[in-house]
Image (cartoon, rainbow, N blue to C red):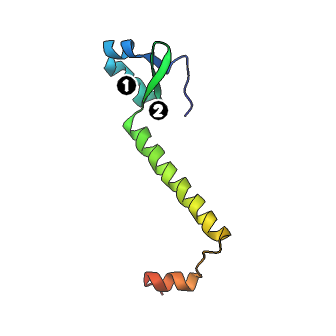
Amino acid sequence: MQTKFSEDVISLSDLKVNPGKVINHANTSHRPILLTSRGRGVAVVQGLEEFEKNGEELAFVKAIAQGLMDIEEGNVTSLQDAKKRLGLK
């Protein structure tokens, strides 16, 4: 989900004052929180569930891209050969 700069940019000093509020916001909004120091972005806080979901989505997209590259390069296997390798009938 896209960052809402009016809500999702928090200074490190605000994080120090109320870290629980920042974590709660990240978890409930399902958006990353950009932490700033002296007006510059320095880190991102993200809820664990969103972090894990993003990792799974990235792995899925990479697998699709690899599969498409394999097809373009001619690295393909027939359905019969695949079933045979997997021990299926």
Q: Residue at x 50, y 49 (%)?
A: 57
Q: Quadrant of residue 21?
A: top left
Residue 63 x %, y %: 53, 60
- Judge left or right: residue 38 versus residue 1: left
Residue 48 percent coordinates (x, y): 37, 38
Residue at the outermost right position: 72
Residue 41 location in percent, x, y?
A: 49, 22
What is the distance, in whole Å, between disc 1 and disc 2 at their CAs?
A: 10 Å
- Amino acid type, label 1: Asn
Q: Which mark is residue 46?
A: none
The residue labelled by disc 1 is: 24
Left or right: residue 24 compared with residue 88: left
x 32%, y 15%: residue: 16
Classify mark 1: helix, strand or loop: helix
Q: Amino acid at mark 2?
A: His
Vertical relation: 21 (above or below) 80: above
- Mark 2 closeness class: few <14, some 14–19, many ≥20 residues within 10 Å: some
Report the residue marked by disc 2.
Answer: 30
Q: Secondary structure at mark 2?
A: loop
Residue 74 image offset from top left, x and y in percent: 65, 74
Q: Earlier in the sequence, mark 1 or mark 2?
A: 1
